[in-house]
Each structure stands twice: as structure tokens, then as C-alpha cells.
Amino acid sequence: MIAEGLFAQGAQVIVAGRKTESLERARRSGLKTVQVDLARDGAPQSLAEHINRDYGRLDVLINNAGTTWGRPIAEFPVSGWDKVVDLNVRVPFLLTQALLPTLTRSGTADNPSRVIMIGSIDGGLRVPETPSYSYSASKAAVHQLTRHLARDLGESRITVNAIAPGPFESRMMDAVLAADGNRIAALSPLGRIGRPEDVVGAATYLASKAGAYLTGAIIPVDGGIATTA
């Protein structure tokens, strides 16, 4: 949603992902793609080298790769903890670290480079209804990492903010919405789930000159589900 929305507004967008079918769909939309599994050792550094070699600059990094796992606490496996925390927390840190020289070259005092994290309203803004313990813990960590990086990278002319989505139609949410979509929509005072333009608008704000003086913020895009409960 974000990639296509920014591309439609004239941005040059590079989508990095591991699934061939998703990347093919992105290419059909006109987006540039790089196939990479960022959970593999060395992959964030390899992607950074590719960006430097082929493009030479980066204005906006959106750390969107993520996964989830849900099992009752008595059955929750160590593998479900490690996989989620590794991808959701470790990867965005390593990718930001690897791309730091590139982002620093692009940023100015008036128009900093941007790092946009994708958190979740389940990451400390509310307690999730599902037994997704590693997911909620990892997204809370993403929110704190956002603030920590914002403080430390400001002098490099880089802002760091997070979007904390509520329910949107995505692969991660498809099964949940199919089973319980009407009730989930009713949790919002607006009575619906998120639409593509909702999250595209938030990302556009953070990436544009309008968001140049904002850093360390966690922006819930959830129709009020977390903030009015």
C-alpha cells in the first residue's frame, strides 16, 4: 500500500522482499524490486550495498518487514518467539545501521532523510486480544527503538518515526478479518478497518516536507481503536 502510494506521487520506490509472487506484483505496478530475505545473516548489509551501488542515495527508508505468531502461553514455542523478535526488531536495526552512511549523505537541516518504522497498536498502545506474545513485545520494542534512534540520529540529519497501524487488509490480517471482520471494524469509533489511503497518507506526511520537524513520534493509524478504548 505504502510503496504504490508513494510511487503514484512521483517517488522512485524500491521494494525489497523475499517472495517471488509479491515482487512480481510490485513490478507489474511499475516498482523496482530486490529479492532478499532480510532475516538471513548479512542480508541487510548486502541490500545496503545494492542500494549504494545502483542508486547512490536514499531519502526514505521504510522498515516494514515483519511477521507474527500466535499460540496459547502454555504452548508458545521458543521458535515462535525467536523468529518474530529477530525479524521485527533485529532486522530494522541492522538495516538502518547498514544504510546510515547513505541516509546521512541525503539529509539536510531543512529536509532530513527519513526512517519510518512500522509498529503496531498492539505494541504498547493496547493489549492484543490474541495470544501473540512475541509480536506485541517486538512491536513495543520497535516503538522504543524508534525513539532511541530519533535521539541519536538527529545530528546526522535523519528523522525516525513510527506508524502504528490498526487492522488493515494485509496478508497478516486476512484470516482474522475473514473470521471476525465485522466485530473488529466495530471496535473503531469510525466503524471500519483501515484503507490503503489511510496508511499512505501517514507515510506521505512523514516522508514529505510537512514532516521534516517531527522525530521520535509513534503515530497510531487505527481509527481510534487504541486511543479511545
Image: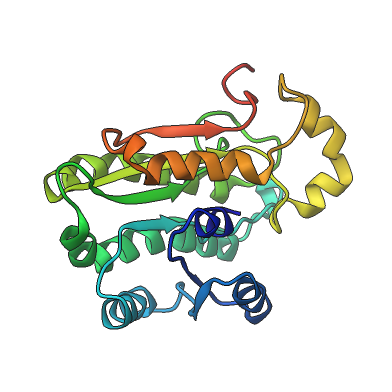
* Rendering coords of residue 146 (x, y %): 34, 43
User: Which residue is rendered at x = 41% and y = 46% of the image?
Assistant: 142
Q: List the single residue furthest toward the top.
A: 228
Relative vertical location of residue 156 with respect to residue 91 in this rendering, above or below? above
The one of 2 and 193 positioned closer to us in this rendering: 2
Q: How is the image coloured?
A: rainbow
Relative vertical location of residue 143 with respect to residue 114 in this rendering, above or below? above
User: Which residue is rendered at x = 73% and y = 36% of the image?
Assistant: 193
Q: Is residue 43 left or right of residue 68?
A: left
Quadrant position of the N terminus in the picture:
bottom right
Relative vertical location of residue 213 with respect to residue 63 in this rendering, above or below? above
* Rendering coords of residue 123 (x, y %): 51, 38
Q: List the single residue furthest toward the front.
A: 10
* Rendering coords of residue 90 (x, y %): 38, 61
Q: Is residue 120 left or right of residue 100?
A: right
User: Which residue is rendered at x = 55% and y = 50% of the image?
Assistant: 134
Q: List the single residue furthest toward the left.
A: 155
The one of 139 and 20 positioned closer to us in this rendering: 20
User: Which residue is rendered at x = 33% and y = 81% of the image?
Assistant: 50
Which quarter of the picture shows residue 63? bottom left
Which quarter of the picture shows residue 218? top left
